[in-house]
Image (cartoon, grey):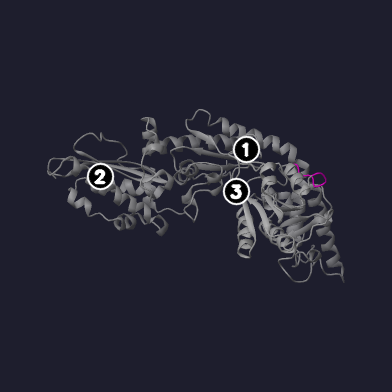
Amino acid sequence: MAYSDKVLDHYENPRNVGKMDDKDINVGTGMVGAPACGDVMRLQIKVDENGIIEDAKFKTYGCGSAIASSSLLTEWVKGRSLEEATLIKNQDIADELGLPPVKIHCSVLAEDAIKAAIEDVRQKRKGSL
Amino acid sequence: MQFPIYLDYSATTPVDPRVAEKMSECLTLESNFGNPASRSHMFGWKAEEAVEAARRQVADLINCDPREIVWTSGATEADNLAIKGAAHFYCKKGKHIITSKIEHKAVLDSCRQLEREGYEVTYLEPSSAGIITPEAVAAAIREDTTLVSLMHVNNEIGVINDIAAIGKVTRENNVLFHVDAAQSAGKQEIDMESMQVDLMSLTAHKIYGPKGIGALYVRRKPRVRIEPQIHGGGHERGMRSGTLATHQIVGMGEAYRLAKAEMQEENVRVLALRNRLLDGFKDMEEVYVNGDVDNRVAGNLNISFNFVEGESLMMALRNLAVSSGSACTSASLEPSYVLRAIGLNDELAHSSLRISIGRFTTEEEIDYAVEKIHEAVAKLRELSPLWDMYKDGVDLNQVKWAAH
């Protein structure tokens, strides 16, 4: 399979790889996918008092497109409000990375991951966000 | 070193230069281009002579009579001809066929076609080592069984079935035995004199011959009958019509001659390379060899690096031409059915690489591969949430995953 330059770039130099303390009340964790399906993404965001995402980290088990989708997403969400982050659609990721149709599910997974992370931090900070 | 390094000899092999030279002598006006079926002139006679010499070379490798060799376009056609041909011919005797879950698609899809025609097929489960036992075959044979079709060596895991022992069972029960030997011919001893195999599929391109040529061995004593699947000029004693491709056949003959002459020596060398490769992974955690380690052909290593997905691993190994059992490398998005059938969980199936070594592989290439695989696995595990969880002592089987 031929990969786009952007997928290769994120794959070669993944941004924001890491893990945050998920017990921290300001950290939201979204873990989506399943090993049996060949991809698992863990996306974490850290929000400040005003609900702005000040940091994002990911780790992904999956193909190059899945790794690139999650890496790109961490770049995009930093500095955005939770509200703005929910507006990111999988198609935006797929377009930016030039994913072929067979790899669209990787971008869907990334969208699911950020939604799950937002939901998680909102739960933790009940009412304050 | 030349990059990328070819480590996919189970998929196909380059044509040996000695083979290519023989083939090139059968194409142009100045050389042996005639139609082997032309009986009225020298061009035809010469071509026929070359074809018959090649037939003897192929027969010599598996120790059979040259008249038992029927040329086909490859092992896929040979599988189709053997399975459908025998099932159709003996349909009055019964309509039950036995095969296994880890056969090549050419066998499985031929069986599926027969199911559509009203035949019944039993798909045997391999052991976790990847073999089909004679006992399992014996237990599956029924009154109406006409054919057992099993591979000698599995294409993904390289594990070897004991076809001599299985042949005893089928012969005792008066059932035909077809063996797909695409991955074993020229790599394992095959002796049709002593093995009770009735039909055997052969190919040239897995053993340094050209693509597009193969053969079906059809036993004469006791005589095995098959219905042709391709009709036409009645070539190959009516079993497979179509003008014989002299250059391809000559190539297969030479490849098989070389295999017979060099197999023993080559197996020793290739096995040493594979051991070197496997030793190179000894210091890594969570690495699994898929299928029996010892009971396999010298050139095959199928290995899983847990918590790393196969396609991303291959992406990191762009200088190595290997293949993976991961879903992402196939059109179906299903992980390897062979690895699943021998009991691997989906994670390990997704994490597998098939590295296959051959005639032109060097020690230097193996050492390079080991180094690159080490680097890639370390990098991807650093990226893997599953590796994190494993390191934190989380039992991944207890996690409730949302399948998608």
Circle 2 or circle 3, nearest the eye: 3
Report the residue marked by disc 2.
A117
Does any portion of residue B152 appear in the rendered image? no
Describe residue B67's horizontal placement relative to residue A35 as left or right.
right
In three-dimensional space, the C-alpha distance between marks 1 and 3, rounded to whole angstroms, equals 31 Å
Q: Which residue reaches farthest front?
A: B143
Identify which residue is drawn at 47% across, 32% down. Answer: B286
Describe residue B268's horizontal placement relative to residue B64 as left or right.
left
Residue B397 in the image: state x and y as whole percent: 41, 38
Specify the segment rendered in magenta.
Answer: B189-194
The three-letter amino acid code for the residue at tag 3 is Ile
Report the residue marked by disc 3.
B102
* Quarter of the image where one finds residue A52: top left
Could you say whether the residue bearing mark 1 is in a helix, strand or loop? loop
Q: Chain under label 1?
A: B
Report the residue marked by disc 1.
B362
